[in-house]
C-alpha cells in the first residue's frame, strides 16, 4: 500500500535561514508521481512541483529546490533564504496505481514557521 | 491553466440540516473528482472518488448515505452533507483530474469551511 511520511510535524526557522522538509514514501509501483503542495492559512492548496519516478534529476525553482532519491525513497524539499511568506503547511503527496484511480496520498504535513 | 471553482468557501449551518458543496472545472473535463476532508492541524483525508456518470467510490469509514456525491457531468461534482452534525465541521476540498493528464491533472478547489452549530 502507498504511504507518505513527513516526520517533521513543525519547524521554526529565522528568516533567511535555509530549511529542508523531509518526505519518505512507500509504493510497490515502478511508475508513480510525487508532489509537493503548500497550504497557507487561507486553506487553498498551492501546487509546487510534480516529479515522475523516472526522472531523478534534482530541480531548482528560485529559492525552492527538490532532491529526489529513489534509493532511499525520499523526495526532500529545501527552501533557501526563507522568508516570512514561506510560513505555511507543506504536504508531500504520492500518486500511484495502487488504488486504481491514481488518487493522491498525502503525508501529514510539516508546518513551517519563519520568524522575522 | 486548469481551474476548479469550489463554492461556497464558508458555510455555517444548523445541526440537522443539509449542505451542498459544488466543484466546477472551468476549462477542462474533470473525468475524475476527489473529495477530501481536513480537520484542524491534520492532513487531507480522501473521502471518495467519483467518475462522471457513475457512482462514487467511498473510502473505508465514510458514510455514503451521509456524504452524497453526484458527478453528473464532466464539469460539475457536488458533495451534500446530509443531516449535518457538529462533528462534521471541517474543511472540505475537491480535486479534479483531467483524464488526459494523469500526472499534472490534480487541480484543487479553494476549499469549503463548514461549521455546524
Image: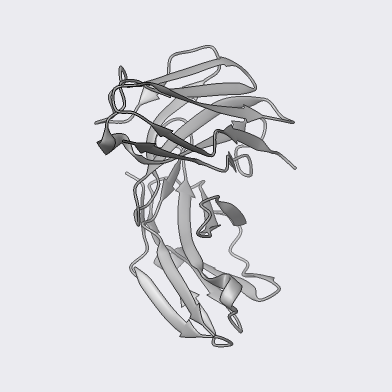
| Quarter occupied by residue B56 | top left
On the image, the x and y values in percent for residue B20 come to: 47, 23
Q: Is residue B99 visible?
A: no
In the picture shown, does residue B31 fall above or below A16?
Answer: above
Q: Residue, x 67% and y 31% (percent of image)? A: B100
On the image, the x and y values in percent for residue A1 come to: 32, 44
Answer left or right for B32 relative to B47. Answer: right
* Towards the viewer: A74 or B75: B75
On the image, the x and y values in percent for residue B5 come to: 63, 34
Q: Which quadrant is the C terminus of chain B positioned in?
A: top left
Q: Residue, x 51% and y 52% (percent of image)? A: A43
User: What color scheme is it?
Assistant: one colour
* Towards the viewer: B29 or A51: B29
| Quarter occupied by residue A16 | bottom right
In the picture shown, does residue B108 fall above or below A53?
Answer: above
> How many numbered callouts?
0
Q: Which quadrant is the N terminus of chain B positioned in?
A: top right
Answer left or right for B114 relative to A59. Answer: left
Amino acid at each position: 500500500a502507498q504511504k507518505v511520511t513527513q516526520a517533521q510535524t513543525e519547524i521554526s526557522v529565522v528568516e533567511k535561514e535555509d530549511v529542508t522538509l523531509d518526505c519518505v514514501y512507500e509504493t510497490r509501483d515502478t511508475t508513480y508521481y510525487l508532489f509537493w503542495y503548500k497550504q497557507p492559512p487561507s486553506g487553498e492548496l498551492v501546487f509546487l512541483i510534480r516529479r515522475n519516478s523516472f526522472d531523478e534529476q534534482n530541480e531548482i525553482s528560485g529559492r525552492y529546490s527538490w532532491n529526489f532519491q529513489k534509493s532511499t525513497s525520499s523526495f526532500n524539499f529545501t527552501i533557501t533564504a526563507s522568508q516570512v511568506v514561506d510560513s505555511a503547511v507543506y504536504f508531500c503527496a504520492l500518486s500511484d496505481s495502487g488504488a486504481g484511480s491514481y488518487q493522491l496520498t498525502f503525508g501529514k504535513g510539516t508546518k513551517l514557521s519563519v520568524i522575522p | 491553466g486548469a481551474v476548479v471553482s469550489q463554492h461556497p468557501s464558508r458555510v455555517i449551518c444548523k445541526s440537522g440540516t443539509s449542505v451542498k458543496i459544488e466543484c466546477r472545472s472551468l476549462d477542462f473535463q474533470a473525468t475524475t473528482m476527489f473529495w477530501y476532508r481536513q480537520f484542524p492541524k491534520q492532513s487531507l483525508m480522501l473521502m471518495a472518488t467519483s467518475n462522471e456518470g457513475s457512482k462514487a467510490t467511498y473510502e473505508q469509514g465514510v458514510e455514503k448515505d451521509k456524504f452524497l456525491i453526484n458527478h453528473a457531468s464532466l464539469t460539475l461534482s457536488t458533495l451534500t452533507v446530509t443531516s449535518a452534525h457538529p462533528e462534521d465541521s471541517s474543511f472540505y476540498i475537491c480535486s479534479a483530474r483531467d483524464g488526459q493528464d494523469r500526472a499534472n491533472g490534480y487541480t484543487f478547489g479553494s476549499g469549503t469551511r463548514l461549521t455546524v452549530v
